[in-house]
Amino acid sequence: MSDGTANGAHERTGLLSFTEDDDSRKIIEFTDWDEEDPRNWPKSRKLINVGIIALMAVLSPLASSMFTPGIDQIAQDLNTSTTTVVGATTGFVVFLGIGPLILAPLSETFGRRKLYLICFSIFALLQIPTALSPNVETLISVRAISGFFGSVGIANGGGTISDMFHPSERAAIFGWYLLGPLLGPTLGPLLGGLFVQHLSWRWVFWFLTIICTVNTVLGFLFLRESYAPTILEGRKQKYEESEGGKFRIADQDDRPFWTRMGSSMQRPLRILFTQPIVLTMAIWQAILFGTTYSLYTNFEAIYGEGYYGFSTTQVGLMYLGPGLGFFICVWFLVPKIDTIYNYLSKKHNGEAKPEYRLPLANVGAVLIPTSLFWFAWTVEYKVHWSVTILSTVFFGIGQITVLNTAQNYYIDSFQKYAASAIAAGAVFRSIIGGIVPLFATPLFDQVGYGWGVSVFAFTSLALSPAPLLFFYYGERIREAFAIDL
């Protein structure tokens, strides 16, 4: 784990260079202005890659929540309880978190493109048996498996963006990409409500089959490999075939294949449990996702017949509150992450540190608990629905600031292994996000929405000093817990 520099030159210099050292094999590496270096690709090519993986990152979380307006309909159709049907969300979200533990290190071994195309093809195909589920057991099991393969966009998206963009320009692009994992659960109930009300819950999954297939086809046609070691490996094989002799990639890991695989598989968990900053930020993200899914799975009860008497379609519109917050934040605040990062780097004689990503997280540290207390007690006292939804706009802004700064911190800290670092946070986030809603509804039933949602607010409040503490003491902590990956 290292700090880096403001322009990203610390990761690779980016034509082909042959040098020799004690090893007799010639070294192949990127040099300045190499057209095959993803950092030097035309902007249009980079954005096509980002667009395809961003859509993958939207569709899997979309699938996690799109059927929630039809929970009652599914329970009735499959002769089961609504609590059991919620298990289909839990299984999906939990495996959405477990997937990156395997898929992220695999992408650092075999390359990004292969993983994207194989996994998302399987994800698209699994929507068919989900739509045809004859019972709730099939629904839950197929959903869980599809969550694993659907996580590929979340597992490797940050790593892909790190492959293509320098640190000084990364945050703004990453902000739009990160909308996917957040906007998917937000738009899902709105779109799902339309299908449930006018067709049936099974059409939710037929729609997902169609749109996921289209995205997969776009990937086969336009997605380019962006992982530098994989690109250089292809170049190495080409030179060995055409020129003879032996070559190796700079910093090549020459350990046996299965040794490398074992090390890769351990990497995300080693990062998670040996790095206090990563663990703390992962817990914070987990609480945010647990809160989000707990609220989303109860919006029908809050805004439907229980409190405000809205129709299924009208309830779906309520999810646009946090979605509006996401867009406001990505448009106005997220670009400031790069601005602050570049300013602080320049101020410290061009020395860039991952901690320079964190100042904006303090905005989220204030907005998240504030907005949750606001939502809790306005719902408890049945204040006009617009007041309650306004609080979710600020919750959405807070979510984006925390998640974006944390993800950029991971990328800057772990560079080559950015995908594994992000996976470390994703597993915690998704498992907690999947399990907590199972306990949230009984909690709300027992103590009401005021104190029930306030539990989440108090938990967020306890973690709110983290960005400030890590900004001042983060470098010292990283050095004390440095690991060799």
Image: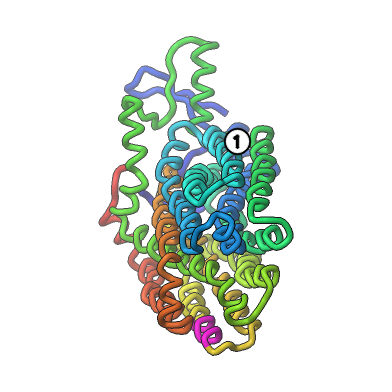
The quarter of the picture where the C terminus appears is top left
Classify mark 1: helix, strand or loop. loop
Does residue 196 lie above or below 140 as drawn?
below
Q: Which residue is painted at 42% across and 23% down in the image?
A: 248
Does residue 54 lie above or below 459 as drawn?
above
Residue labelled with disc 1: 33
Question: Where residue 1 sits: x, y (%)?
Answer: 36, 49
Question: Where residue 77 sits: x, y (%)?
Answer: 59, 56
Q: Which residue is painted at 45% across and 66% down in the image?
A: 437
- Magenta segment includes 418: no
Question: Where residue 89 sits: x, y (%)?
Answer: 50, 57
Can I make out residue 31 in this image? no
Q: Is residue 272 left or right of residue 300?
A: left
What's drawn in magenta, residue-wise?
Answer: 373-380
Does residue 140 lie above or below 252 as drawn?
below
Farthest residue, direction left: 480
Q: Which residue is painted at 57% across and 64% down in the image?
A: 72
- Magenta segment includes 377: yes
Q: Which residue is painted at 63% across and 49% down in the image?
A: 205
Farthest residue, direction right: 198
Can I make out residue 201 in this image? yes
Judge by depth and name the residue closer to the eye, 11 or 79.
79
Badge 1: few (under 14), some or many (20 or more) residues near its Cα, within 10 Å? some
The image quadrant of residue 379 is bottom right
